[in-house]
Image: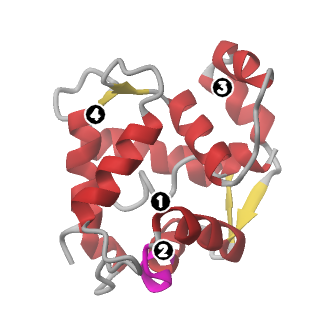
Amino acid sequence: MMLYICLAFAVFGASTAQDIGSICHSNRLQHTEDQVIERIVQMMNTDFDSVISRKEVLVFFAELMGIQLGGLINLVNDMTNEQLLQAAAGVSIEKESFSHAWHARFHDNYDFVYATFDRFDISNDGLINALEIEAIVNSALAHGDKNHDGKLETEELVSFLESIYKNC
């Protein structure tokens, strides 16, 4: 169930870099912002249709956290957004677990990952829960959906991620 809560805070986390303060992106392996963004988008757009769905976000973060969906992937794909939220009710991910997983995969500096996490821990309880994730996804759509079609296309995701990674 942890996978439902990991959904997207780091990817859809900050609408602008000002939201995470003065913490700039840095990377242990010297990956540039563009390299990290490209990797995130490639990993997230699993059906190669140039549109990032909420379900693709779910699968992305499940894999990030080492959760193997296996046969459950079809169940997840058949769920509505409301069903996903209901399934995730009461489940949360704590700061250290997520930060370590994100750092291990993308090698971003912990200060950057922590600042992003803190921005979206709306309740300030050290956890990100399903309602906070939904608010993050909605924020990403509000700030990233440039053509206002209710979908986040890969180019829009890249632009949104650039606002997080490059503008500090």
Amino acid under disc 4: Thr
Q: According to the image, label 4 marks what residue? A: 154
Q: Which of marks 3 and 4 is in front?
A: 4
Above or below, 127 relative to 81: below
Q: Which of 15 and 45 is in front in this view?
A: 45
Between 129 and 50, the one lying in front of the other is: 50
The answer to the question of whether label 3 and label 1 lie on touching residues, with beta carbons closer than 8 A, is: no
Tell which circle, 3 or 2, labels the residue nearer the N-terminal end.
3
For the point 56% across and 44% down, which residue is it?
134
- Magenta highlight: main SS: helix
Q: Earlier in the sequence, mark 3 or mark 1?
A: 1
Q: What element carries label 1?
A: loop
Q: Does the magenta stretch include residue 112?
A: yes
Q: Is residue 106 above or below residue 1?
A: below
> In the rendered view of the protein, which quadrant contains the N terminus?
top right
The amino acid type, in three-letter code, at marker 2 is Val
Residue drawn 26% across the image and 71% down it: 17
